Amino acid sequence: MAFHAEGLVAIVVFYLAILAVGIWAAWKTKNTGSEGDRSEAIIVGGRDIGLLVGGFTMTATWVGGGYINGTAEAVYVPGYGLAWAQAPIGYSLSLILGGLFFAKPMRSKGYVTMLDPFQQLYGKRMGGLLFIPALMGEMFWAAAIFSALGATISVIVDINVNISVILSALIATMYTLVGGVYSVAYTDVVQLFCIFLGLWISVPFAMSHPAVTDIGLTAVHHVHQEPWLGSINSLDIYTWLDNFLLLTLGGIPWQAYFQRVLSSSSATYAQVLSFLAAFGCLVMALPAVLIGAIGASTAWNETEYGVPDPMSKKEADMILPIVLQYLCPVYISFFGLGAVSAAVMSSADSSILSASSMFARNIYQLSFRQNASDREIVWVMRITVFLFGASATAMALLASSVYGLWYLSSDLVYIVIFPQLLCVLFIKGTNTYGAIAGYLFGIVLRITGGEPYLYLQPLIYYPGCYPDENNIYIQRFPFKTLAMLSSFFANIIVSYLAKYLFESGTLPPKLDFLDAVVARYSREHMDKATLVKSDNIVLNELAPVNPRHSLTLSSTFTNKEAFNYVDSSPELSNTEDN
């Protein structure tokens, strides 16, 4: 492939435009946040993200390179097709469910990160444990995006993949470093517009290429390959359902999503943003679906790509840039590929900021340096943005199975964090003992189920498993959902069992070493109850409650689930009186 100067110019123009918008957003909002609240302003802005910018940035959280390229690949691959392109529907339903059930309680209580409610109810130790799968998910997601981006750029201009990955990561890290959530949000608007315009301009040209058969015909008839609508084999129904639930429910407990929820101006706005983003995800998937269908309808031996076809060359994951490169006029392909390449960063920057936000607040500040100054926290965030960006770049360049690691970490988010989030928000009475039990149950059941991407053999062979070409057993049983449900019920059962054993006197109070039942009103738990600042909560977004005049104003902003078992406790009375 020859070097294309025009393609390089297109990429440089798009990259400079995005960098300029990011720096402008940082300059425009540099004074956001009162004195002493600058770190919070970097994480959630001034909690004043409006509907337009909020809708764009929440959509762009999911609609990045992996979403666009992955959807096109799923539609193109013979034997899978549109029936297995689960991301558009799965992520859209995830955003709808997040808006209906999770956005309002999280935003109303004024949390700053997704881990705040866990540390508030379960303590800093449990918050640290839950940070691990959350960090893994964000970091491997960013690494997978950078890896795909390097390959995409190499299709356009045939430059060294490593250079393109480093350059892209450097730009994304730079504007995230200086502007925080505002830079990420405003650049998301530009990036999403680039994806939409670049792809929709390309689709008509690609569809009208002489080598492309009518996609309506190839949808149901075998022409160049199997029909691109695809089908679900009866043996694979449970695998399909397992993966669909992972996308739908596992797409909720991500800091990148809750960062947008918590940045919105009110809880109602947070819900509306989720619904707008769900619609945006569906709309943005349409051109990717069409491009995948075009790839499946093309006689590649009649194009400059030649033979064999992308599937035979094991380049199915690159079908979107290949279609744009070989089926569109030069100026259209460069515009489309340049826009998509620049826009891939719309998810990577979110992941980097999310990981640094959780570390700076929930690990560094709340676990180790409770008295750290706001300036110190800001610098910790900036350092970790750089370190996490560099780590994601290194993984993209060095790891041979970044996607495998991301799949496994995404599973852990679904299996470990989602049931914990359900318990901490909606199930009364869960405590740290149950949370640890659920955490361990989920991880053990997931790892023992094996992972083909990492060549990890299962230790538990569920019904229907079979060996692949590498003799790694593939599970047909929905073991991921089983692990998630086991984690959920383990949390509830162990929590109530621990509560019964301690409160009945079966176990002495001194064994409550986590201060989760008997020592519920210890110093640590009183600290946990004040994680939320009262001035962060919009009063009209709170659920209506009957006023109790014996309570002080400050006590109405604490998590009452931490106090609802021993209402007559003298320590609680003293707290309220104070």
Image: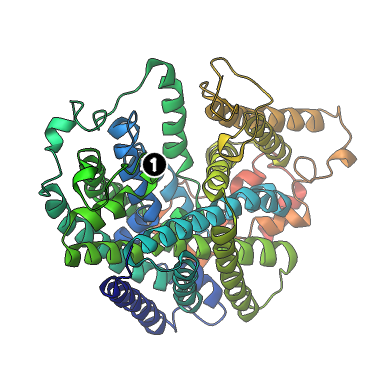
Q: Quadrant of residue 52?
A: bottom left
- Crowding near pointer 1: few (<14 within 10 Å), some, many (20+)? many
Residue 360: x %, y % from top left = 62, 67
Residue visible at 42% across and 58% down? Answer: 151
- Identify whether 279 is placed above or below 52: above
Residue visible at 22% across and 56% down? Answer: 199
- Can residue 107 be seen here? no
- For mark 1, what is the residue? 94
Element class at badge 1:
helix
Query: Is residue 551 or residue 442 the one in the foreground?
Result: 442
Residue 194: x %, y % from top left = 26, 65
Q: Is residue 57 left or right of residue 546?
A: left
Residue 459: x %, y % from top left = 69, 25
- Identify whether 46 is placed above or below 277: below
The residue type indicated by label 1 comes to Ser
- Can residue 209 be seen here? yes
Q: Quadrant of the C terminus?
A: bottom right
Residue visible at 48% across and 79% down? Answer: 178
Query: Is residue 312 or residue 425 the one in the foreground?
Result: 312
Q: Quadrant of the N terminus?
A: bottom left
Q: Is residue 114 left or right of residue 120?
A: left
Query: Is residue 539 or residue 288 the one in the foreground?
Result: 288
Q: Quadrant of residue 389?
A: bottom right
Q: Quadrant of residue 152?
A: bottom left
Residue 482: x %, y % from top left = 56, 25
- Identify whether 322 is placed above or below 358: above
